[in-house]
Image (cartoon, rainbow, N blue to C red):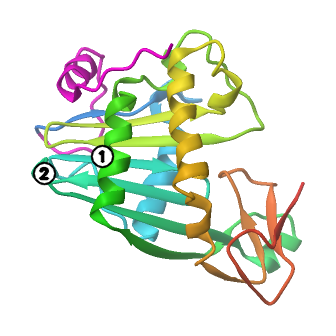
Amino acid sequence: MLDVSGNFMRAFISIFMILFVLSAFGQTGKVISIPTFKNYENKLDTTLWFKWKHELTKQINLKNLQTSNDTFHFRFWTDIQAIDIWTVDNKTYFGTVTNYAQRYDNKLLRKGTYQIDKVFTNQINLDTSKARKLFTLIDTLSIISIPSDEKISGWQQGFDGEEFLIETSTPSYYNFKTYWTPRIFADSLNEAKRIQIFVDFLYKDFKLYDYYQKLKLPEGSYRRNGIQGIQIKTTKQETIGARTITDLL
């Protein structure tokens, strides 16, 4: 049986026991935790996932959670959507679903250069009951206490599959975490199982993908999962969402 805790305070204490890395992106007094690695110059650098999403956050007008003072703010990234759930008083909960699509410059693409020329986006507000329901599930599964996948023994990385990203913020700390294809490890890792339960709820019960149908896209080739070389090409002059979009490998 899945062993989860619904106590956010215990989760907060657990997180503060982790070694945090102070980032140049953060503000004084707020503890910042971002996955890092040694670059080609043997210097500490932030991951590409963080760099991509940090830039994308500005492009689609999302709040910078590294400087947010919300009591609690949770952001879940897929390759085409960002789900935000937050509260400022632990009583009222707010939520949004932000859809986005990154279109390649077609002229440069024909020359083999993958450069984004425009980002299309829209945002849908969630009613309080839906926001609270998502918050309750995040709490029940103790999602914020789950370390980034590179810190979990047995959670390996791959080139295909899905990448889910989670940002968590309070007035005292900010966390950025990555989770590669949790469904592969859900049978062997409790942490992956909890992430996958949350993912399944978003798509099966919350109908997350239906929100994406409200984003109208002109014809073009689009980046998916932040990976160059995997394109999405619309088949009509205008499409709604991604159900009329096909992967071109």
Q: Which amino acid does label 1 sit on?
A: Phe
Q: Give the range drawn in magenta.
A: 1-28
> Does residue 90 sit above or below 215 in this rendering?
above
Does 237 lie within the magenta span? no
Label placed on residue 91: 2
Q: In this view, does 242 lie to the left or right of 134?
A: right
Label placed on residue 230: none
Q: In this view, does 223 lie to the left or right of 247?
A: left
Quarter of the image that includes the C terminus: bottom right
Tell me the SS state at disc 2.
loop
Q: Where is residue 181 in the image (x, y as percent from the top left)?
A: 66, 33
Mark 1 = which residue? 25
Q: Which amino acid does label 2 sit on?
A: Lys
> Does residue 209 sit above or below 9 in this rendering?
below
Give me the residue at 31% from left, 34% from top: 139
Q: Nearer the viewer, mark 2 or mark 1?
A: 2
Give me the residue at 16% from left, 38% from top: 30
Q: Position of residue 9 (x, y in %)?
A: 17, 25
> Does residue 26 sit above or below 6 in this rendering?
below
Residue nearer the viewer, 238 or 40: 238
Residue nearer the viewer, 69 or 187: 187
| Label 2, label 1: how far apart the Cα atoms are | 30 Å
Give me the residue at 42% from left, 22% from top: 147
